[in-house]
Amino acid sequence: MLKGLEAINWGSLHHAYWTASDVPPLLRALASPRRKERSSAVYELYGNIYHQGTVYELCAHGASLPPLAR
């Protein structure tokens, strides 16, 4: 599911709060067997990528979608 995640230059992309360098661990957490870890990742990703009605660069470039689509 997360093949190719390292090929994306996350540091060059931004979300609501800072560079998107924190996104790969959050995407990996979505595959965690622990429900609390998955839930926390969803909360963080939602707040970072789609914050108060604004869609941030990370989502606009589609960088976060290919790893999830696999």
Image: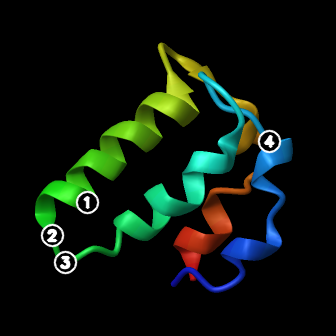
Quadrant of the image occupied by residue 28: bottom left
Q: Which residue is mark 3?
A: 33
Q: Amino acid at mark 4?
A: Leu
Label 3 element class: loop
Where is residue 13? Give x, y as percent.
79, 41
In the shown orientation, is residue 38 left or right of residue 53?
left
Q: Looking at numbered disc 2 in the image, what kind of residue is underneath it?
A: Arg
- Using residue 35 as the reference point, say whether residue 66 is left or right of it: right
Report the residue marked by disc 1: 38
Q: Are marks 1 and 2 in contact (CB under 8 Å)?
A: yes
> At label 1, which amino acid type do we have?
Arg
43 in relation to 47, above or below? below
Look at 26% across and 46% down and name the residue there: 40
Q: CA–CA distance between discs 4 and 2? A: 28 Å
Rounded to the nearest angstrom, the CA distance separating label 1 from label 3 is 8 Å
**Residue 28, label in figure:** none
**Residue 45, image x, y percentages:** 45, 43
* Residue drawn 66% across the image and 70% down it: 66
